[in-house]
Image (spheres, coloured by chain):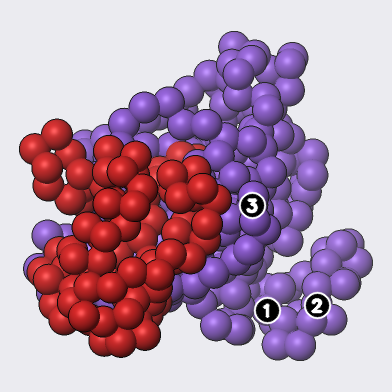
Chain colours: A red, B purple
Amino acid sequence: MMNVTIKISSLFRKFTDGQEFVKVTGNNTVECLHELEARFPKIKRWLYDKQGNLRPQIWFFVNGQKISADDLTKPLNDGDELFFVLAISGG
Amino acid sequence: MLDKSELARYERQILIPGWSKSGQEKLKKAKVLVAGVGGLGSAILTYLAVAGVGRIKIIDGDKVELSNLNRQVLHSDKDIGRDKVDSAKEKLEVLNPQINVEAIKETIDENNVFDILGDYLIVDAMDNLPARFLLNKVAVKKKLPLFHGAVYGFEGRATTVVPGKTACLRCLYQGVIPGKIPVVGVTPAIIGCIQASEVLKYILGIGELLTDRLLIYDGLSMKFSEVRLKRDPNCCECR
Ligand SMILES: [Zn+2]
């Protein structure tokens, strides 16, 4: 299991007691998210749609590089930083 | 050629390294379209106008409402009920009488977007994703740069799309969660000024653009961060 730091963007920090960084372990992005949800269950409603699929309106980044849906199950390395933001469109 | 009053008006920016009189002439000849005259548009247009962008086209089909006024600073109480483009054009011509502002009171759609955009640089100041996708489609087809900004509450984003080279909006967005968008005026002001900076740099050919980079502004913790984007090889628009 890899040690991964999840950086929480401001819109989601209300679900992590205001924490900006949450340390988790997991082999890929999906596993890391499962640990995050287990600790902060209220975040689930934002990450998944009613069918239980990860919302395409959330963008994921590993070490600052955007990843695609196919990359969500790709192996992560020890020390990686996972970051996600909600797509926004206000003007 | 710049006349005496133009040289005086733009004196301070002409001093910027890499700008000079020839840069100012480039701005005077430039054609920029700003789609949306809301929160982002108000900031973008104000600063492109005073910087001396010679031909500015603005498009918006909406009328000014009271609930716009917390952020759309080109409009004021006496404009309520007027077309936003007319209200904006009037203010911009007062700010800088030496530029040309063309106002188009239309909502862009599949049928009119190609003609309206012409060969203008495209600034995306829309408030909804379908309209942004239309701008992106034309940008990709015509290989015109697109300067993107978006806001939500105290949070904002910006990136610059150069078709054929960088990720486009379709590489990035797969929808947004629906609902009324909370927003405070300072956020589109900051993001709009970033978009306007990108436009000026693009025209002048100076600095580094926000290409393949997404700038993320978090006004609550007052932090700017940046992530890298890449083209989606399966993008429905730009592949
Ligand atoms: Zn694309």
Residue displayed at 43% across by 64% down: A22
User: Secondary structure under badge 1?
Assistant: helix
According to the picture, the residue beneath numbered tag 1 turns out to be B23
User: Which x, y percent locates residue A34?
Assistant: 22, 58
Q: Nearer the viewer, residue B214 or B133?
A: B214
Q: Nearer the viewer, residue A66 or B203?
A: A66
* B34 lies above or below A67: above
User: Which x, y percent locates residue B59?
Assistant: 47, 37
For the residues beneath circles 3 and 2, the answer to whether they share a chain is yes
Q: Is mark 1 within 8 Å of ligand 1?
A: no
Q: Which callout, 1 or 3, points to the residue nearer the camera?
A: 3
According to the picture, the residue beneath numbered tag 3 turns out to be B219
**Of marks 2 and 1, which one's residue comes earlier in the chain?**
2
**Of marks 3 and 2, which one's residue comes earlier in the chain?**
2
User: Which x, y percent locates residue B200?
Assistant: 61, 69
User: Secondary structure under badge 3?
Assistant: loop
Separation of marks 1 and 3 at Cα, in angstroms: 33 Å
Q: Which callout, 3 or 2, points to the residue nearer the camera?
A: 3
Residue displayed at 34% across by 52% down: A39
Separation of marks 3 and 2 at Cα, in angstroms: 31 Å
Q: Amino acid at mark 3?
A: Gly
Residue displayed at 28% across by 51% down: A37
User: Secondary structure under badge 2?
Assistant: helix
Q: Residue B14, which numbered label?
A: 2
User: Disc 3: which chain?
Assistant: B
Q: Is residue A71 left or right of residue B12?
A: left
Q: Is residue B47 visible?
A: yes
Q: Is residue B112 visible?
A: no
